[in-house]
Amino acid sequence: MSAAGGKLKAASVSITVNVVMMAAKTLAAFATGSIALFAEVAHSFFDLMASILAYWGIKKAERPSDETHHFGHYKYENLSSLLQSLLITGTAFVVIYEAVLKLIYPSPVENSEIGISLMLISIPVSYFTSKYLNNAAKHAGGSQALEADSAHFNTDILASVSVLVGLILVKFGIPAGDPISAFIVGMIMLYISYEIGMRAYHVFMDMSPDRETIGKIEEIMKSEKRISRFHKLRARVSGSSIYVDVHIHVRQNMEVRSAHTIAHELKARIMRKVPAVKDVQIHIEPD
C-alpha cells in the first residue's frame, strides 16, 4: 500500500472509532445525566470532525502540483491540523462553561455505573487507536494531520480517566466530582489544541525541521568527499514534506557534467536517507 493509501486508511479507521464511541457516550450521557459525559460527547463529536478534516487534508495534500500550486498541495495537512485545533478550542470553552454552571447549580447523576463501565472500555480503545494513528503517521514519512488526530485520542484517554474518577466520586456520594471532571476535560482540550495549533502555525511560517533532521542532512553533506565544502543549508516543512536548499563548492576546473552528477547523486542520497525530504535544490559554486 502506498504512503497516501496508508494515511487514508488510518484516517478512515479514526472516523469509524469516533462514530462508535460518540454513539456510546451519547447513550450513556442521557442515561446518567452526567455533565462530564455530555462533555465527553462534545469532545467525541469534535474528534469526529477532526478525523474527517484529517482525511480531507490528506486527500487534498496528495494532489499533484498544478499551474496554481507549483510546489504541490502538501500544506492542506497543516491547514487540517489548524482547523482541528480551532474546533477543539471552541468545544473546550463550551465544556468549561457548562461545568462551572453545574458547580453553581448542581443536578443529580443517575446510573453512574453505566458511565464508569463505558469509560473503562473507552480508555483502552483510545490508547490503541492513538498508537495506531501515530505509527501510521511515522510509516508514511510523517503526517501532521494523523499526528493531530492521534493527539485527539491521547486527550480522550486523559479525559476518560478524569470522567471515570468523577463518576466514581459521584458513586461514593460526592456530586461535585462530575462537574469538576468535566472542567478538567475542558482544560485538557485547551492544552492539546494549543499544541496542535502551534505546530501548524510554525509550518505556515516556513519553520525549519527539527535539529535532528537538519543534523542528518549535514552529515550526508559532510560525507561527500567530491565537494570541498557547503554552505547556506536551508530547509522548510510543508505538510509532511521537507524542502532543502544548499550551496556546494567544487573544483574550479571541474566539468559541468561532473559537477551535475555530484549534485544529482547527493540529492538522491539525502532523499533516500531522510524520507521526509521531498526535494533538494543544490547550487553549484566553483572554489
Image (tube, grey):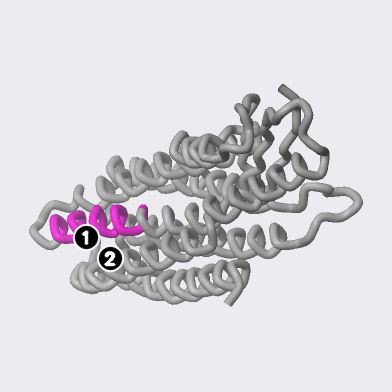
Snapshot quadrant of residue 127: bottom left
For residue 166, side relative to residue 282 (left or right): left
- Magenta segment, which residues? 155-170
Q: Residue at x 57, y 56 (%)?
A: 272
The residue sitting at the front extreme is 253
The quarter in which the N terminus is drawn is: bottom right
Reply yes or no: does residue 132 show up in magenta. no
The residue sitting at the top extreme is 287
For residue 187, side relative to residue 230 (left or right): left
- Tell me the crowding category of disc 1: few under 14, some 14 to 19, or many 20 or more residues within 10 angstroms, Cα based: many
Q: Is residue 77 among the parts visible in the rendering?
A: yes
Snapshot quadrant of residue 256: top right
The quarter in which the C terminus is drawn is: top right
Front: mark 1 or 2: 2
Snapshot quadrant of residue 97: top left
Percent of width and height locating residue 190: 42, 41
Percent of width and height locating residue 57: 65, 58
What is the three-letter code of the residue carrying label 2?
Answer: Ile
What is the three-letter code of the residue carrying label 1?
Answer: Leu
| 269 up-or-down from 17: above or below | above
Q: Nearer the viewer, residue 110 or 125?
A: 125
Q: Residue at x 75, y 39 (%)?
A: 259
Disc 1 and disc 2 in contact, CB within 8 angstroms: yes
Q: Which residue is mark 2?
A: 123
Query: Which numbered marker is on residue 164?
Result: 1
Percent of width and height locating residue 65: 81, 55
| 245 up-or-down from 262: above or below | above
The residue sitting at the left extreme is 172
Q: Nearer the viewer, residue 92 or 252?
A: 252
